[in-house]
Image (cartoon, rainbow, N blue to C red):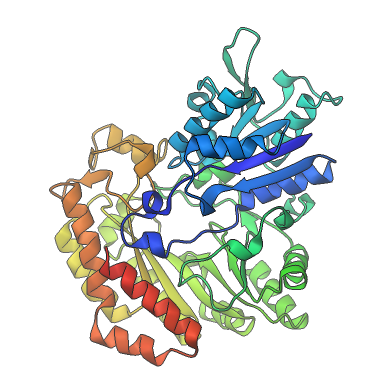
């Protein structure tokens, strides 16, 4: 089967809003690349059209898709691009009645909502590699399970009624998956945000799936489950070697929701990087309660140059309200240990969380400036559908939703106003204030200038300053 997989059009300004549209990342669609690898291994002919690079209207995108003459079309769908994906499906059906399959995070959380669209024939929910493969096998008339027995999919029966099959069990051994089929896209076209790489060319990877924690604002449990599953160290090292060999990659950005939960795995990985003499730098995302000085020193020695910490807040009441299961002391210790190890700190915050007020943000910024992470990102709380926090807010707790427009659920727009804020405009004003208060300090500016080592560092600094000034 010729299978075309799509990233729907979603303009950078729509995704990131004013200011950050110039520096927002455009990264390879790892989910589609995994699907492509599994399909290819089974003998199908996958292709990927990533429209992140184009400012196409849905009709133009559909016309471009028609050139592929595909037997099946799969469309990636997260919550924020859902409306774009549906419009695209409608245009595709106008041109040719090819089976259209939706998959991705939004489909996993709301499969029936998606399947009820007239232009959507099938949905794949949960971990999709094998569900999608079995569906494509079924559509190709290969011998296989009947449509009603394929786990992890939804379909429409002979009378047009939407049906959801039983969910598929999570993949226990992630090593059985082939490496992402990166040859299906032009790797040279992608770009990370200025603070997401140390050297170019850079690539993204995932070494694990799942997270055992239950932060109220997060939907990872619905996507990957609570069970933490890591690929073997050897499997990860082999993928890194392939990236270096095939694409000249010098820098790796691990996009795991929770990297390195297993300390034995982390130590084994660091030793393997050194043993294989891999000339790479890398960064990852960690929780503040999963690292310690010894592990950080090993990570630094193995090429780790930055860690993204999901700090979220420096107010204990706010952390407790969202079940973060961390403390302000844990945060302070983790940032201090990371800095002592010589690893750069990227601290991610979420503004407008329950219990927050503009006054608390100002107090938090005083403390944050003293801690002085290398980079800080201020997201705006996005109550994603069917998360615990979304359900609590809908029940009247914490504040009020001011918009459920899926297009705005990106973390860059105020769609929820907690009790401590006046309105959405105040939430966005506090975010602008936070960015300028943190980054436009004389001490911070001088420290960044002292860290400049090459023209790429200068380019990144300039792009960042321009983005914040235009917020």
Residue shown at the point (29%, 66%) measured from the top left: 314
Q: Is residue 103 visible?
A: no
Give the image quarter of residue 345. Answer: bottom left
Residue shown at the point (77%, 72%) measured from the top left: 245
Residue shown at the point (43%, 49%) measured from the top left: 11
Q: Nearer the viewer, residue 470 or 358?
A: 470
26 is higher (above) or lower (below) than 442: above
Which quarter of the rendering shows the N terminus?
A: top right
Task: Name the spot of residue 105 as percent of width and height, x first.
Answer: 53, 41
Give the image quarter of residue 324. Answer: bottom left
Q: How many discs mark residues in the rendered view?
A: 0
Q: Nearer the viewer, residue 223 or 101?
A: 101
Give the image quarter of residue 471. Answer: bottom left
**Left or right of 435: which side holds 341?**
right
From this viewpoint, which residue is outermost toward the top? 159
Q: Nearer the viewer, residue 211 or 451?
A: 451
246 is higher (above) or lower (below) than 59: below
Q: Nearer the viewer, residue 456 or 199?
A: 456
Task: Name the spot of residue 240 as percent of width and height, x first.
Answer: 72, 69
Task: Name the spot of residue 131 as percent of width and height, x first.
Answer: 70, 34
**Left or right of 470: which side holds 142?**
right
Q: Is residue 160 visible?
A: yes
Task: Name the spot of residue 437 as percent of width and height, x first.
Answer: 22, 73
**Left or right of 209: which side holds 378?**
left
């Amino acid at each position: 089967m010729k299978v075309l997989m799509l990233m729907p059009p979603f303009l950078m300004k729509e995704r990131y809003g004013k200011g950050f549209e110039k520096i927002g990342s455009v990264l390879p669609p790892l989910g589609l690349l995994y699907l492509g690898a599994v399909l290819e291994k089974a003998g199908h002919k996958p292709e990927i059209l990533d429209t992140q690079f184009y400012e196409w209207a849905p009709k133009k995108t559909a016309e471009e898709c028609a050139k592929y003459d595909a037997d099946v079309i799969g469309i990636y769908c997260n919550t924020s691009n859902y409306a774009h994906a549906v419009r695209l499906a409608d245009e595709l059906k106008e041109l040719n009645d090819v089976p259209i399959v939706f998959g991705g995070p939004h489909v996993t959380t709301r499969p029936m909502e998606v399947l009820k669209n007239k232009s959507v024939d099938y949905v794949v929910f949960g971990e999709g590699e094998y569900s999608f493969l079995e569906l494509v096998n079924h559509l190709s008339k290969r011998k296989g399970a009947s449509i009603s027995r394929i786990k992890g999919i939804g379909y429409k029966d002979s009378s047009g009624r939407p049906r959801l099959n039983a969910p598929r069990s999570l993949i226990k051994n992630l090593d059985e998956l082939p490496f992402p089929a990166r040859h299906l896209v032009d790797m040279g076209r992608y770009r990370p945000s200025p603070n997401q790489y140390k050297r170019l060319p850079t690539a993204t990877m995932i070494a694990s799936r799942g997270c055992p924690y239950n932060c109220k604002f997060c939907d990872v449990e619905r996507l990957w489950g609570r069970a933490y599953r890591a690929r073997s160290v050897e499997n990860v090292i082999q993928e890194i070697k392939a990236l270096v060999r095939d694409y000249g990659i010098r820098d790796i950005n691990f996009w795991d929701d929770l990297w390195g939960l297993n300390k034995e795995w982390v130590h084994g990985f660091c030793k393997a990087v050194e043993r294989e003499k891999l000339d790479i730098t890398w960064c990852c995302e960690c929780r503040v309660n999963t690292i310690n000085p010894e592990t950080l020193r090993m990570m630094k020695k193995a090429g780790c140059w930055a860690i993204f910490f999901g700090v979220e807040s420096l107010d204990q009441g706010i952390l407790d309200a969202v079940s973060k299961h961390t403390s302000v002391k844990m945060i302070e210790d983790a940032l201090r240990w990371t800095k002592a190890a010589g690893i750069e700190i990227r601290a991610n915050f979420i503004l407008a969380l329950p219990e927050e007020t503009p006054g608390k943000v100002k107090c938090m910024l005083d403390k944050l400036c003293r801690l002085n992470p290398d980079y800080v990102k201020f997201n705006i709380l996005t109550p994603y559908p069917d998360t615990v926090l979304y359900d609590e807010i809908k029940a009247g707790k914490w504040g009020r939703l001011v918009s459920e427009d899926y297009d705005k659920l990106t973390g860059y727009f105020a769609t929820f106003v907690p009790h401590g804020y006046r309105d959405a405009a105040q939430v966005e004003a506090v975010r602008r204030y936070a960015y300028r208060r943190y980054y436009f300090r004389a001490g911070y500016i001088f420290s960044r200038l002292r860290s400049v080592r090459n023209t790429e560092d200068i380019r990144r600094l300039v792009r960042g300053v321009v983005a914040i000034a235009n917020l």
